[in-house]
Image (cartoon, grey):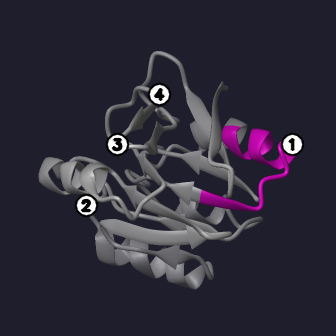
């Protein structure tokens, strides 16, 4: 199963559109948005896939975003998503809550941790798990997304 991982769109549909085109070309099965969604218009752009959203520190209207996500038939996980795809347990969060982020990194139940907030793409291994930041769709030196193949837990960061 191929997952598209995105983050930090901050409501900018013009910066999100290239990511959508790339996700379509890569034929992902689902998308995880690591927070700082920014607007209901961005939510609508992910209609082609089951998409899982978490809130970031700049998602000020969480009730409005939750409604937009629900109205789009998508999945809103609040500040933290505990997901499983093909037997692979994945933590989804924005990482601005540093204590929660550290506890997730130390929790052995997760095979992968997908996070945003830093606007810097990163792929590394920590305590035997994949730690993946797709970078940002807005306000980044290089805009990027990530692809995560499960159950093998192999990831690639792709610049837009």
Q: For the residue labelled by badge 2, is the local secondary structure a helix, a strand or a loop?
A: loop
Give, as a single range, the part of the protein colored magenta.
Answer: 19-31
Whether 43 is among the magenta residues is no
Label 4 crowd (10 A; few <14 / some 14-19 / many >=20): many
| SS at circle 1 | helix
Q: Which residue is mark 3?
A: 127
Q: Does the rendering let one see residue 158?
A: yes
Numbered label attached to residue 121: 4
Q: Nearer the viewer, mark 2 or mark 4?
A: 4
- Identify residue for label 1: 25
**Circle nearer the N terminus (3, 2):** 2
The residue under label 2 is 60
Q: Earlier in the sequence, mark 4 or mark 3?
A: 4
Q: Earlier in the sequence, mark 1 or mark 4?
A: 1
State the SS at label 3: loop
Residue in the image at 77% along x and 65% along y: 48
Q: Are marks 3 and 2 in contact (CB under 8 Å)?
A: no
Of labels 2 and 1, earlier in sequence is 1
In the visual, does 83 lie left or right of 57? right
Q: Which circle, 1 or 4, is nearer the viewer?
A: 4
Question: Callout 3: 10 Å neighbours few (<14), some, many (20+)?
Answer: few
**Which part of the image, by quadrant, shows the C terminus?**
top right
**The magenta stretch spans residue 28:** yes
Q: Nearer the viewer, residue 77 or 63?
A: 77
Nearer to us of marks 3 and 2 is: 3
Q: Are marks 2 and 1 in contact (CB under 8 Å)?
A: no
Q: Please provide percent x and percent y for residue 73.
A: 62, 82
């Amino acid at each position: 199963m191929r997952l598209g991982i995105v983050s930090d769109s901050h409501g900018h549909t013009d910066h999100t559109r290239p990511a959508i085109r790339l996700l379509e070309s890569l034929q992902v099965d689902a998308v995880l948005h690591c927070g700082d969604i920014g607007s209901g218009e961005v939510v609508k752009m992910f209609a082609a896939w089951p998409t899982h959203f978490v809130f970031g520190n700049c998602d000020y209207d969480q009730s409005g975003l939750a409604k937009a996500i629900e109205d789009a038939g998508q999945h809103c996980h609040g500040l933290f998503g505990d997901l499983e795809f093909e037997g692979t347990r994945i933590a989804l969060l924005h990482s601005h809550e540093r204590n929660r982020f550290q506890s997730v990194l130390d929790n052995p139940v997760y095979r992968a941790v997908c996070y945003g907030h830093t606007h810097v793409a990163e792929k590394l291994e920590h305590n035997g798990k994949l730690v993946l930041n797709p970078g940002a769709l807005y306000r980044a030196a290089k805009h990027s997304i990530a692809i995560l193949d499960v159950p093998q837990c192999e990831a690639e960061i792709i610049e837009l």
